[in-house]
Image (cartoon, rainbow, N blue to C red):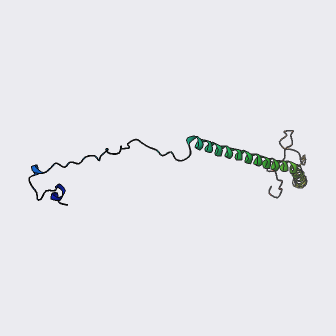
Amino acid sequence: MTEAVIREKPGMASVKDMPLLQDGPPPGGFAPVRYARRIPNKGPSAMAIFLAAFGAFSYGMYQIGQGNKIRRALKEEKFAARRAVLPVLQAEEDERFVKEWKKYLEYEAEVMKDVPGWKVGENVYNSGRWMPPATGELRPEVW
């Protein structure tokens, strides 16, 4: 649109002759400007979040406690089985040790038969205490 149509005057006159047309607020004024921080009130409250987290934590700790009880019972069962089998295993080892010890004494008697005053099976350390060999095995073929 042209200036002449807006001001309802034919043609353009001097700027001073033109009627004053100024922008202004609409009747009744502008709507108020919202400048305050407005956070929507959606979602659970802080207390609800805290209670949910506390509930989840408590349930998890309860489950850990139950798992510990089960694991402790299984461990005790395993140790009880070991304690029950230990005498049998020890008896087998003692029987094996006696057989090997007899073989060793026979071998010692054969090897040391020419040494005067040698007593077969006597401890050469004279400590007065009997102790089994440190290796736990008697293997004359290695000596």
Q: Which percent across, then down, holds residue 5? A: 17, 59
Q: Residue furthest bottom?
A: 1
**43 or 115: nearer the viewer:** 43
**103 or 124: nearer the viewer:** 103
Q: Which percent across, then down, holds residue 77? A: 82, 49
Q: Which percent across, then down, holds residue 45? A: 56, 43
Residue 30 appears in which quarter of the rendering?
top left
**126 or 67: nearer the viewer:** 67
Q: Is residue 71 visible?
A: yes
Q: Quadrant of the N terminus?
A: bottom left
Q: Is residue 66 left or right of residue 27?
A: right
Q: Is residue 118 left or right of residue 6?
A: right
Q: Is residue 113 visible?
A: no
Report the residue at 46% width, 44% height from top. Answer: 39
Report the residue at 25% width, 46% height from top. Answer: 24
* Mark count: 0
Q: Quadrant of the C terminus?
A: bottom right
Q: Which percent across, then down, holds residue 12? A: 10, 57
Q: Residue furthest left?
A: 14
Up-down: is 72 above or below 1?
Answer: above
